[in-house]
Image (tube, rainbow, N blue to C red):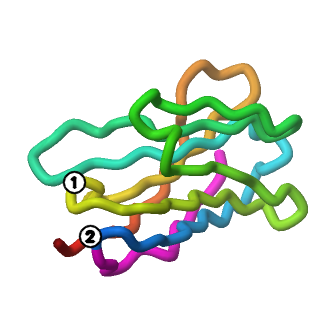
Amino acid sequence: QVQLVESGGGLVQTGGSLRLSCAASGRTSSMYAMGWFRQASGREREHIATVTWSDGRTYYADSMKDRFTISRDNPKNTLYLQMNSLKPEDTAVYFCAAKMNGRSYFESWGQGTQVTVSS
């Protein structure tokens, strides 16, 4: 497993931007992919984007690709999510997760970081 710590959340006005970070430690050499998810109050967790760790291929939920960008810095073992043109409906707890080699699911999760977009 790996340990994940998110940072960069906070309060931002509508139309603003934030960049979230997720620092990974532990068995990072065995990571296959990392992803970002979010969960708004009273709603189910939803996928935002995934990046494969070795070659940087990215996958986005259709509703997220226009304003959100996932990236990674392999030497720093850090995942990023750039969020632009934020809207009040983007208010949620944002989580990063890691999928290990040979696994079909995200097995390691961070504690989450709160993003609040004011109108």
Whether residue 32 can be seen here: no
Residue type for callout 2:
Val
**In what quadrant of the picture does the N terminus appear?**
top right
Up/down of 57 relative to 35, above or below = above
Residues rendered magenta in the picture = 1-13
Q: How many marks?
A: 2
**Few, some or many residues within 10 Å of mark 2 (<14, 14–19, 20+):** many
Up/down of 61 relative to 67, above or below = above
Write down the residue under mark 1: 89
Residue depicted at 15% across the width and 41% down the height: 43
Quarter assignment of residue 4: bottom right
Residue depicted at 77% across the width and 32% down the height: 57
Up/down of 10 relative to 37, above or below = below
The kind of secondary structure element at disc 2 is strand
Magenta stretch, main secondary structure, is strand
Write down the residue under mark 2: 117
User: Going by the image, does 70 lie left or right of 73?
Assistant: left
Up/down of 9 relative to 32, above or below = below
